[in-house]
Amino acid sequence: MRILIRLLLAIIIGVAAIFSVSNRTLTIIDFYPLPFSTAAPLYTIVLGALAVGLLLGVGVSTLSRLRLKLKVRNNLKRAEAAEMVLKNKPREVPHSLTKST
């Protein structure tokens, strides 16, 4: 499995390197409502956008995982508390099993 992950990572890095070499032309970025504009190579714009998207996705995923972990922890505490209540509660004999005289 590690070999497969490393191979996939090497392919991604290779594609990014080829993309970077092929798209070195300067592109003007204009932030329309603002009076700012800048020139940057196209590969930095595209790879930067991918990096920002990756970081946002990882952040949202991490928050979701933390929320689910907290929910699991709370449910485990509730289950343990319910088990303790059941252990300490005296057993009741069902009404149909009691002798009637």
Image: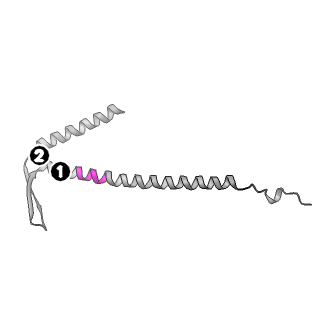
> Does label 1 or label 2 sit earlier along the sequence?
2
Q: Residue furthest bottom?
A: 33
Q: Measured from the top left, where is residue 4 in percent x and y?
A: 32, 33
Circle 1 sits on which residue? 46
Task: Report if the CB atoms under discs 1 and 2 are less than 8 Å apart.
Answer: yes
Quarter of the C terminus within the rendering: bottom right
Q: Residue furthest front?
A: 88
Q: Amino acid at mark 1?
A: Val
- Nearest the eye: 19 or 98: 98
Element class at badge 2: loop
What is the magenta range?
Answer: 51-57
Q: Residue furthest right?
A: 101
Circle 2 sits on which residue? 23
| 81 vs 1: above or below | below
Marks 1 and 2, how far apart at CA:
10 Å
Q: Measured from the top left, where is residue 93 in percent x and y?
A: 79, 56
